[in-house]
Image (spheres, rainbow, N blue to C red):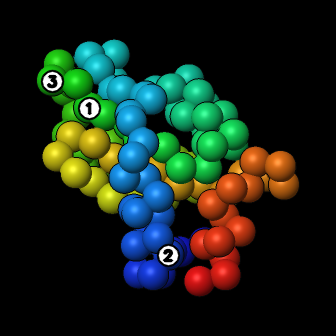
Amino acid sequence: MTLTGKQKHYLRSQAHHLHPIFSVGKNGLNPEWLAQLDGALQKRELIKINLQQSADETVSDVQAYIEAETPIQVVQTIGRVLVLFQPADEEKYQRYSVDVNQL
């Protein structure tokens, strides 16, 4: 699923008040981290992650890794913070994907 400009705009507005719940540090990117990220997105659909100062990766490296390895979409990057979206599989957790599909 590729997001349109309207859909991204909606998701950015919904993510404005969120705080980062994951971070990328000196341990870097690995499959276990991606599995945890996927699990969180299955419950929330929209989250922010942050890159710590000690991280060896750049924001573009993290974005490329996430999008290449998973169906997660990077909606926005602000400095060292990324906003991520993935529709939840279970209907009871579909908070944003219903609205996104209607746009």
Which residue is identified by label 1? Answer: 51
Indicate which disc residue 69 carries: none
Q: Earlier in the sequence, mark 2 or mark 3?
A: 2
The one nearer the camera, 10 or 55, is 10
Q: Answer yes or no: do the residues labelled 2 and 3 have beta carbons within 8 Å?
A: no
Kind of element beneath mark 3: loop
Kind of element beneath mark 1: strand
Judge from the rendering whether residue 50 lies leftward or rightward of residue 78; answer left or right.
right
Which amino acid lies under the numbered mark 3 shown in the image of this protein? Gln
Q: Earlier in the sequence, mark 2 or mark 1?
A: 2
Indicate which disc residue 53 carries: 3
Residue 72 image point, x, y percent: 54, 53
Question: Is residue 18 visible to us here?
Answer: yes
Mark 3: few, some, or many residues within 10 Å (few <14, many ≥20)? few
Q: Is residue 46 above or below residue 96?
A: above
Distance (Cα) linking label 2 and label 3 = 31 Å
Quadrant placement of the N terminus: bottom right
Indicate which disc residue 7 carries: 2
- Quarter residue 59 falls in: top left
The one nearer the camera, 23 or 91, is 91
Q: Residue at x 15, y 23 (%)?
A: 53
Distance (Cα) linking label 3 and label 1 = 7 Å
Which amino acid lies under the numbered mark 2 shown in the image of this protein? Gln
Residue 17 image point, x, y percent: 39, 46
Single out the residue that lies furthest toward the right: 91
